[in-house]
Image (cartoon, rainbow, N blue to C red):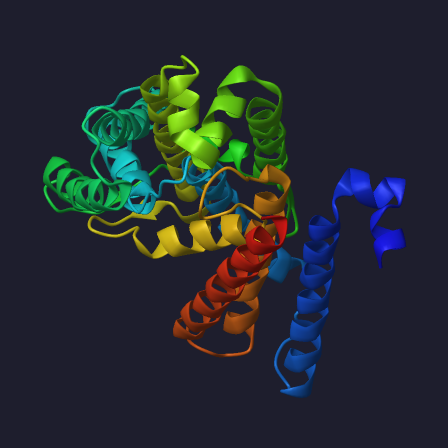
Amino acid sequence: MEKFKQNPIVKKIGFNRLILIGVLILMYLAFGLFCSLMGRATFFNISRLYSAFNYTYFLGFLALGVTFVIGTGGIDFSMGPVMFCSALISGYMLTKMNIPVVLAILVSALVGTLFGLFNGYLVAYWKMPSFITSMASMMLAKGIGSVFTKTQSVSWPSSMEANGWYRNLVKIPLGGGLYIPTGLVILAIAAVICATVLNNTKAGRYILCLGSNKEAVRLSGVDVKVWETLAYVICGMMAGIAAIFYVGAYTTVQPGLGDQFNNEAIASCVMGGTSMAGGVASIGGTFIGVLIISVLQEGILAMGFQKDYQYVITGIIVLVAVYADIRSRKRRN
């Protein structure tokens, strides 16, 4: 096993990432086999894959954003509701106030960024626990989105309408039920950018160092408040961007929802190798983790089970991943 780990290709990709890719492939094959044995429609068809991709688009941006926060040793439970709040406010302004689509997209990103700035300021400057801060922001996001739209759901323009061009950011129809999953391409590009920022820039190094030893970073003369706030700002901005990909896939947004996606985004990060204790983060692992969660939820629905089963399995995955992280840190120490 050690010889395999030292293989140049394995070292470049990462042993843990290879394990995750193997899990993803086996899970996909297993769901296909179970669906066949149960006499249900085959899992190996393009429509099932497209359905899983619809989930991947927005969940991926949420997971990429929260990776930065977890890297500092913090947590954010507000990103799902912030995504919905961003989609509600920008969608309401688009459909009721007739602002251009481009401006609506910018408004969505801005709303998410402001929530991230709010969380980061409270955590970094007021020394409030990130758990409490994000829980408060979660309730604020639900309330603000609901009040802004007068408790009404918002439906973004369909692909048949003049303003529906934004859906090309998610998928470009080819006819015959086929389309190009542009959302997956954009998500992959975003993952590369996030990985570059986290691993090859001063900002990323400081963010990870905060999770390793915040006091040591402060004593070295670094303004830790700025970099800790930045992690939450990135997370909020990603939630605002995720809103566009959510409405691009599902069109309608309802007030008061979104918190069900928090655990799935966090599970994707932890499964991918990001330590809940901070200091260690893997954008590539997060990306693969998102694919696993997406295939999981699609497979459970394909087998005829309720979505509640996904929550059970996701909870087990989080527990196993955190336990593995604890064991790994003990070995390193």
- Can residue 136 be seen from the camera position used here? yes
Report the front residue among 134 and 72.
72
- Asked if residue 15 lies left or right of residue 101, the reply is right
The image quadrant that residue 171 belongs to is: top right
In the image, residue 224 lies at what x, y percent? 36, 21
Report the front residue among 86 and 123.
123
| The N terminus sits in image quarter | bottom right
The image quadrant that residue 13 belongs to is: top right
Report the front residue among 238 and 123.
123
- On screen, residue 174 above or below 219: below
Report the front residue among 5 and 113.
5
- Asked if residue 224 lies left or right of residue 126, the reply is right
Q: Which residue is located at x 23 percent, y 28 percent?
A: 118
* Number of marks in the rendered image: 0
Q: Which residue is located at x 46 percent, y 27 percent?
A: 207
- Can residue 44 be seen from the camera position used here? no
In the image, residue 185 lies at what x, y percent? 63, 35
In the image, residue 180 lies at what x, y percent? 65, 40
Outermost residue, top direction? 221
The image quadrant that residue 271 belongs to is: bottom right
Q: Which residue is located at x 41 percent, y 68 percent?
A: 311
